[in-house]
Image: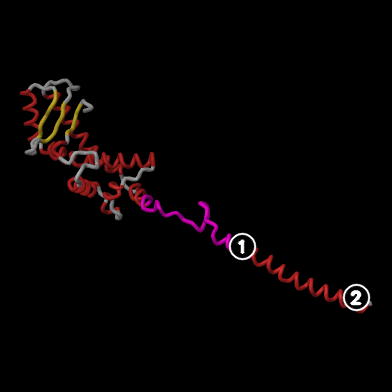
Amino acid sequence: MSLLTSLIQASTRFQQSLENRPAANGAGEPTAKSAGSAEAVQPAGPGDDRFTPSGNSVDDAGRLKSQKLPLADYKQTVGQDLAFIRETLRHKLAEYNLNSATAVSVNKNESGKIEVGGTLAEETRTRIENDLNLNKNFADAFSRLSINEPTLHFMDNALKLNQAYGVNNSLLDTLISENQQFNGLQDLVHRYDTLRRSAPADPFGATTNRGAYAFNLNTRA
């Protein structure tokens, strides 16, 4: 009986070993496979280093270009013409014994002649117009200002919106060259004027007719 008992025990252990071996493999393999599958399909989170958003690369490039613009230099250049025109008009008011606070406007007509508007007597207005048209320095400064100031005004507003709200202006990006050597004020003025003339509508918020530009003294109009 002891031999039979030994055979039965040996057979039982062998059977148990056979049953345990596939059970262990069966429990292990699916676990590893499941872990592998979970890792494969797991989406990358926003902070995952493997995922780099690239949707704003164009905006970032445009912002970097605009930040390099020497806007202060442009303002100084335009400011010199503004100061010259303002002082010339003030001297004219004094020359004709007019109140220094008299509202005066200056623009060019379709033929390119300087016109003066405001609360002036007709004879006085005509005499001041003639004086200004004969003043080549004044005429040249006014011509420069009529194209430089609208360009500077557009760029200044676009950059302020960019800095305040992160709004990137695609039109401003079009004006700015990748090469800073070609971003002088006159380069930008030329491209700005070309875009204004070619646009079917006026996306710049400024008139496409240079002759409509007017300088106003002692008035907010």
Q: Which mark is residue 152?
A: none
Q: CA distance from mark 2 to mark 1?
A: 44 Å
Closer to the camera in the image, 50 or 13: 13
Apparent side of residue 8 relative to residue 182 in the rendered image (left or right): right
Closer to the camera in the image, 23 or 84: 23
Apparent side of residue 12 relative to residue 1 in the rendered image (left or right): left
What kind of residue is marked 1? Ser
| Residue 46 included in the magenta stretch of the image | yes
**Residue hosting label 2:** 5
Q: Which mark is residue 34?
A: 1
What kind of residue is marked 2? Thr
Residue interval drawn in magenta:
32-60
The percent position of residue 69, horizontal first and vertical second, equals: 31, 47
Q: Vertical placement of 220 versus 23: above or below?
A: above
The percent position of residue 180, horizontal first and vertical second, equals: 30, 53
Label 2 crowd (10 A; few <14 / some 14-19 / many >=20): few
Closer to the camera in the image, 92 or 44: 44
Answer with the quarter of the image where residue 141 lies: top left
Of circles 2 and 1, which is in front?
2
The percent position of residue 82, horizontal first and vertical second, equals: 21, 35
The percent position of residue 178, horizontal first and vertical second, equals: 30, 55
The tag earlier along the polypeptide, 2 or 1, is: 2
| Residue 111 included in the magenta stretch of the image | no
Q: Quadrant of the N terminus?
A: bottom right
